[in-house]
Amino acid sequence: MSDSTSVEENLDQATSATANAADISAEQVADYLTRHPDFFSGNEYLLEKLYVPHQRGNTVSLVERQTSLLREKNRELHDYLGDMLGVARENDIQFTKTKNMILALMDAATLDDVAVAIDESLCQDFNSDTTALVLFSDQSEAQNNLRLMPRTEAAAIDTLVDQSQTRCGNLTELQNQFLFRDQAFRVKSAAAVPLVKGETLGILAIGSYDASYFQSNQGTLFLDYIGQALSRVVSPLLQDRQA
C-alpha cells in the first residue's frame, strides 16, 4: 500500500509542476529576463536550446541585420588594423635603413667618402641599382658616382635642381644620360633629390633598372629627409675642397 501511495504522490507532484509551468505566460518570462539580464551567464546550456528566427519570407530580422552590420564593421576594422600594422612595419624598416645611412654620412671625412656611403646604402639597403652625386663647384672632377662641375655646365638638369622636393618617375632622355652616363640605357625609373643648404649644392640621383621602382605618385618623405641630411654633410666638405 505504501509503495502505491508513493507512486501516486510523485505522479501528482509531476502533474502539478507541469500545470504550474503551463500557467507561466510569455509576459512573465519576458519580465523575469528583463529583471535578471545576467540569467544566461549561469545557464549557458539553455542558449543551445533557444530558437531565434532570423528571416521570414523576404523580410530580414533586426537581429540578423545587427549581426550583419557588426560582422561588416569587424572585417573593416580588421583590414584597417592590418593596413596600419603593415605601414608601421614598413616605416620602421625605412627608418632603420635611413638611420644607418645618416650615421655613415656623419663618419664621412671627404666627399669621396660621402659618395661611397651613399652608393653602398642606396644600392644595398634600398635596392637601387645606381647612383649619381653631382655637386656644383668651380673645379671639375669625376670619380665613380661623384662629379664636381660648375653650375653652368649642368643646364640639362636645371628643372630637377630648381625643385624644392624630390622628383620620382621617368626622367627625360637627356637628363638620364647626363646623370647616369654609361648606365643611362639601363635606368628605367629614377629619383632626383635636390641638395640645398642656403644655396643649391647639386643633386643626388638614384636610378633603378625597374620601370615601376620609382613612380611619380609615390611618397618622398624619406628621400627628402635624406636630401636634407646629405646637404648638411656635403656643404662644409664642399667648401673645404674649394678652399
Image (cartoon, helix red, strand yellow):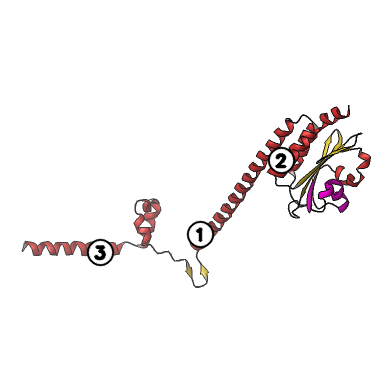
* Quadrant placement of the C terminus: top right
Vertical relation: 97 (above or below) 61:
above
Asked if the residue under mark 3 is in contact with the one under mark 1, i.e. CB atoms within 8 Å, the reply is no
Q: Which span is picked out in magenta?
A: 169-191
Q: Going by the image, does 32 lie left or right of 93?
A: left
Q: Residue at x 21, y 65 (%)?
A: 15
- Dot 3: what SS? helix
Q: Nearer the viewer, residue 7 or 169?
A: 169
Separation (CA) of disc 1 from disc 3: 36 Å
Instruction: Write the residue at 91% across / 39% down.
Output: 151
- The answer to which of marks 2 and 1 sits earlier in the sequence is 1
Label 3 sits on what residue type? Thr
Percent position (x, y) of residue 107?
73, 30
Q: Is residue 235 above or below residue 176?
A: above
Q: Earlier in the sequence, mark 2 or mark 3?
A: 3
Q: Single out the residue that lies furthest toward the right.
A: 152
Q: Are marks 2 and 3 in contact (CB under 8 Å)?
A: no
Q: Which residue is mark 3?
A: 18
- Within 10 Å of the Cα at label 3, are there few (<14), some (14-19), or many (20+) other Cα atoms? few
The x and y percentages for residue 111 are 80, 33
Secondary structure state at the residue bearing disc 1: helix
Residue nearest the observer in this picture, 41 or 108 = 108
In the displayed structure image, the side of residue 158 where residue 34 appears, left or right: left
Which residue is label 1 attached to? 67
Which of labels 2 and 1 is toward the front?
2
Mark 1 Cα within 10 Å, few/some/many (few <14, many 20+)?
A: few
Kind of residue at disc 2: Ser
Q: Which residue is mark 2?
A: 121
Disc 1 marks a residue whose amino acid type is Thr
